[in-house]
Structure formats: C-alpha cells, structure tokens
Amino acid sequence: MAQVPVQTIHRDPQLFYWILLPITLVMILTGVLRHYATVLMATAPKKLDQKTHREQRSLLHGINVRGNFHVLSERSFNTRRDALTTDYESGAYLKDPERRGQAPPNPMTDPSSMDGMMGMMKNQMAMIVPNTLIMSWINAFFSGYVIMKLPFPLTIKFKSMLQAGVATKDMDPRWMSSISWYFLCIFGLQSVFNFLLGSDNAASQMAQQMGQMGPATGQLFGPGVDPDKQLLAEAENLAVIEHYSVLDNVEQRLLEGIRV
Amino acid sequence: MAPSLLHPPSQLSPSAALQLSQQAPVVLRDSPSTVSSSPLTALFSASETADLWIKYENLLLSCLRTGDERAAHQCLERLVARFGDDNERIMALKGLLKEADAQNNDELEVVLKEYDQILSENDTNIPITKRRIALLRSLGRVSDAVSSLVQFLKFSPTDAEAWSELADLYLAQGMYPQAIYAMEEVLVLAPNAWNIHARIGEMQYMAATAPGAGSPSYQKYLAEALKRFSRSIELCDDYLRGYYGLKLITTKLIRDLTKAAKQTDETEFTLPDPTTVERLNELATAKLSEIVRRSTAQEPGWRGYDKLEVAAAREILSEDASAASRTER
C-alpha cells in the first residue's frame, strides 16, 4: 500500500514573528479597544417620569393580582378586581389619557425609542468598522501566505475554512492561511477576553450576535406597544378569573399533612 | 448562622449587628478603597465585584446601628468615590448618615427640606422618597408619612417594602382593615411568604379582639386568621409564630363556641366545625411543646428560634395546662 507522502513546505520561521503574532496581537487589542469604546459610548438608560412609571407598574400590579389571586379571600380579591378594572377601563393609569384610541406612534419616528436604535447602531458600528479595517489590512499585506501547520490531521472538508485565500487544490488541509487565522481569532478569542476584561465584556462579537437573536426582553413596554390596549386586555383577563383561594380547606390539608 | 456582610443587616439582633460593626476596621483595612477604572490596572489586578460594594453598604448600616459613625463615614466615602454623588442609592445613604448625625429635631427638619429639594428635581427617586417617609415617621408626623406613602404607592404599586411599611403604619394607628389590605398587597407580590401569611393572621386576630368589633366581623376575622395561620404552617413546618397563632385562636374558639352564630354570606370564610378546631388545637399544642422542648435543649437543627418567641410559647402552654387542670377539678 502506497503511503501518502507527507507534504513538507519550507516556511521562513520569520513568518511566525511577522504574521502570526501581529494578527493575534492586533485582534486582542482591537477587542480590548472595542470593549472600552462601548463602555464610553454607552448612554445611561433614560429616566422614566412618574407617569410612565405608574403606567408600567400598574400593569405589573394587575398581572401580579391575576397571577396570585389565590392568596386572597374572595371578598378582597373582588375589591381589587373592581378597582383595577375600573381604572384600567377609564384610562386613569395612562401616561397621556388624551391620546387614547389613537394609533401608537411609529417606533421609527418616535424620539423616545430613538435612543435604543442609536445604541444598537453604535454597537453595530463598533463591530463592523474595526472588522472591515483589519480584514482589508490582512488582505493587503498577508494574503496568500501559508503561515502554520496544525499539529493534528484534518479531513478535506476543512480546506475551505483553513485555506481561504490560498488556491492550491492538493495541499493538506493542515496548512493554514493567514486570513483563516484571522477568522479563527474572531471566534476563538472569547475566553481571552473573558480573562482580560471580565465575563460581561463588550469585546466579543459572538455575545452581541446572540443578544440580537435572543428573545427581545422588555417587549412588555417596548416602543410601538399601545399601553391602553395592554391595560384593557389585562382588565379582561382579570374579569374572567374564577376565584378560588388557597385558604379553602387549609385546615383539613394541614391535619392530614402534618403528623407530630 | 454567623452574620454575613453580604446580607442586609436589618433583621439582625443587636448583638449580631455589634459583631458586624466591630469588624469594620478589619474590613476597611483589607478591602480596596477604590477600584481603578484604568484599563492597564484592570488587566493586572483582580476585577471588581458587586460583593465589595454590597459589603460596604451593609457595613455602613450596621455601623450606624451601633453608633460607629466614623466607620460609617468611611464606608460612605468609598461608595461615593465609586458611584458618584448623584446615584440614587448613594443619595439615600448620605441622607441616612445626615439623619444619624442630626442632634435634634430642627436638624432633622433641615434634612427633610433637602429631601424635598431632591424630590422636586426628580420625582421618581425611589430611595429618597422612602427615606423621606421614614424620616417623617421618626419625626412623629405619622399622617404625613401615610399620605406620602399612599402617594408613592399610587405610582409604584409593586413595591412590597412600601406596602408593608404602610401596613405597619396603619396598624400602629389601629386601622385594622386598611392594614390588612396593605399586607394582602404584599402577599400578592410574594404569594408564598409564610411570615406574611402569619402576619395577616395576627392582624386579623387583633382586629377581631379589638374593642368595638361587632359579632359578625369578629367571626369573619377569626375564621380568616385561623386559615392564614394554617397556611403559614403549611408553607413552613415548625414555624413557631404560625403555631402560636393557631393555638391562640383555637383556644379562643373552643372557649366561646357556645355563642357561635350562623354565617349567611357565601363569599366569606366560615369557621371550621368544632371537632376540627379541637384537632387543630391539639396539633398546635403538641407542636409548640415539641418546639419549646427541643429548642430549650439546644438540639441541632432547632436553635434558630427567637428566645422571646419560645418564652411566649412556653407561657401560653402553661396557661393552657393550668386552665385544663382547673376544669378537671
């Protein structure tokens, strides 16, 4: 059986000092820089005025009453239900009652929701700009270099990942090109940033992408949601509750459950 | 359990608070006073944790309780250096220190004016709003405190701390229905808090036995109190206050069982039948005596009871025993 000859490519050892190290170093430093840039650019969350507070918290209050109605006796639950439903329906908790019934403001033009948009834009820019710069830097100076040989064998599928920018068909996938090293750095430096900057750093792009894909938190009061509709829906939810109480027959449960 | 600086010290006994505040010099010496925010040092030194600042805050509160105002000021300085003067929580702590430093009511009035000033600039500053209410209460202006608390709860009805403070204020004035209402709101926010269940039971017992309570409301209150105490025990076995309340109420019910009136309203809780009351009474007696016996003997796992509560339980048991021997004779 013919042994596949081991490919040997003679590389200048200086490649290591002049390509591998610089790329890694630049990637780390950009990550650190991006972290501090994000920290500096972050705007403090906007203060809510008292009326917004009231609107949001009274909705939460209703949700709490609906969720935990069973701790109340029927009479006190009915009192609360009546009070909350009346206030919800009359719009007493609304931030600006005269805007009732109008369409909710367009989130794209609403100035109050622009801050969130701006924050997102800033984060995106902080990610895109340095990445583009580094990418073009590597492309301009180091494209086509084979800079290292991985110490373990790989299948042919990895070729496109590890040898981007090097168009040789027969080369062993263990050989790695500079642009691929850059991509590996993008995805692999997460733990280095965790070590350097603490676990909640802004340097890693993976975390940011996850955050964008994850469930949108704060949707309850997000822009473009009509609080009036929410409150009315909550009033309806309260109205359909069939009351029972944990206090019903609690003595029997206790006598059965506890043995001395 | 040894007191820890990582938990808020409001529930600690005086001796535990003293123990904590005596650690102040050591903690102040060993913990870093500030954490540099420059990137270079952050790379090489340990990163800051939230625990550090929680420790300072709790140490400050303990030191204020035990009168160690110098250490409290040091804690505050470090907190201010970290979070700045205009952080809401820091503002409240600063106010607290000023209240502690005040010698007489006039100086407290000055602090109150400062609070009003802060609130006129930013009316959603919750820590300062709470400090102001607490200050009003300690100045003796209870009705002002109640009205500002009600005002506060209007725009923040999901604040359990404020509701329970309101309940306490109403209770101090003997306004039982209002106090019970406020306490029920706490329960809505924390449905499985057994101590709140028991607390409502206590309030209802007080309302039932208060002079002027009519017979129908008396029955209603006692029935619900009985259920509240039962629920608190159901949630937390061996809860002394729950058993104590159960014992108190069942004894009372057994004593005046004869004049029990029929209830008509369907929405109200009804008193359980006499045999159930008897059995609950027996259960409470047995459990209370077990708790008293074991915690007096300092058995492992039974040491956490408050001494005064155990003494009260022993008293009610001995009363019960003497009453029983009297009827036998």
Image: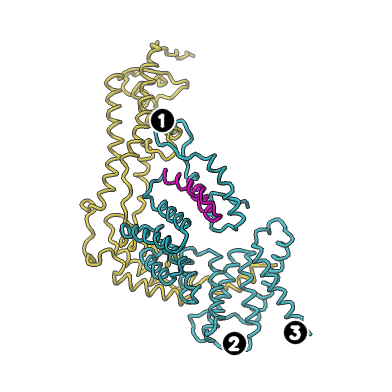
Q: Which secondary structure class fits the magenta region best?
A: helix
Q: Nearer the viewer, residue B170 or B248?
A: B170
- The image position of residue B140, as x and y in percent, is 46, 69
**Could you tell me if residue B30 is visible in this image?**
yes
Q: Which marked residue is nearer to the observer: mark 3 or mark 1? A: 1
Could you say whether the residue bearing mark 1 is in a helix, strand or loop? Answer: helix
Q: Is residue B129 magenta?
A: no
Write down the quadrant of residue B285 in the picture. Answer: bottom right
Apparent colour of chain B? cyan
Dot placed on the residue nearer the N-terminal end, 3 or 1? 1
Between marks 3 and 1, how big is the CA–CA gap?
82 Å
Say yes or no: labels 1 and 2 on the same chain: yes
* The magenta segment: B53-81
What amino acid type should be assigned to the residue bearing mark 2?
Ala
Find numbered disc 2 in the image and state the secondary structure of the residue it sits on.
loop
Q: Which residue is mark 3?
A: B327
Tell me which numbered mark, 2 or 3, is placed earlier along the sequence: 2
Residue, disc 1? B40
User: Which is nearer the eye, A218 or A209?
Assistant: A218
The amino acid at mark 3 is Thr
Q: In the drawing, what numbered circle is on residue B154? A: none
Q: In this rendering, which labeled residue sits more in front, label 1 or label 2?
A: 1
**Chain letter, colour yellow in render:** A
Do badges 2 and 3 share one subunit? yes
The residue at which mark 2 appears reads as B260
Task: Give the secondary structure at mark 3.
Answer: helix
Q: Earlier in the sequence, mark 1 or mark 2?
A: 1
Q: Residue at x 40, y 58 (%)?
A: B128
